Amino acid sequence: MADLGKGVPSPCNQVCVLDAHEVCIGCGRTSDEIGCWSRASLEEQLDIVSRAHRRLQEIQTMNSTHKD
């Protein structure tokens, strides 16, 4: 398990493209979440990662249902 003493590792995966809703299609974070990442507390970073993960899942689900 990662050492969280210095915070959560950034979820950035170098695919830095924002969609029309200001959500990065690479990591799932909003532009606001990206901007405040380095100042966020451990708890806030964990919340951001959780929300970003949900967003990416929603995007993948939406994309898979529109491939017909």
Image (spheres, rainbow, N blue to C red):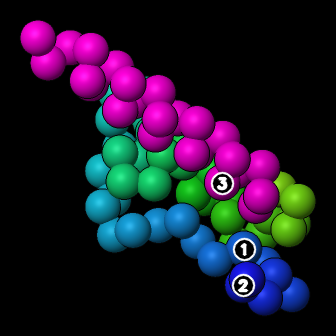
Mark 2: which amino acid? Answer: Ala
Residue denoted by label 1: 8
Horizontal and vertical percent position of residue 12: 47, 67
Residue position for label 2: 2
Within 10 Å of disc 2 (Cα), the crowding (few <14, some 14-19, many 20+) is few
Q: What span is colored magenta in the figure?
A: 45-68
Residue located at (72% from left, 84% from top): 2
Cβ–Cβ below 8 Å for labels 2 and 1?
yes
Mark 2 to mark 1 CA distance (whole Å): 8 Å
Q: Quadrant of the C terminus?
A: top left
Q: Position of residue 25 (x, y in %)?
A: 35, 45
Helix, strand or loop for the magenta stretch, by majority: helix
Q: Residue 7's x, y, as percent? A: 78, 78
Amino acid found under the numbered disc labelled 3: Val
Q: Residue at x 67, y 64 (%)?
A: 37
Per the image, label 1 sits on a secondary structure element best described as loop
Q: Quadrant of residue 22?
A: top left
- For the view shown, which residue lies furthest in the left direction? 68
| Mark 2 vs 1, N-terminal side | 2
Q: Earlier in the sequence, mark 3 or mark 2?
A: 2
Whether 35 is drawn above or below 19: the answer is: below
The reply to whether callout 1 and callout 3 are in contact (CB within 8 Å) is yes
Side of 59 relative to 9 (left or right): left
Q: Residue at x 78, y 88 (%)?
A: 3
Real-space Cα distance between discs 1 and 3?
9 Å
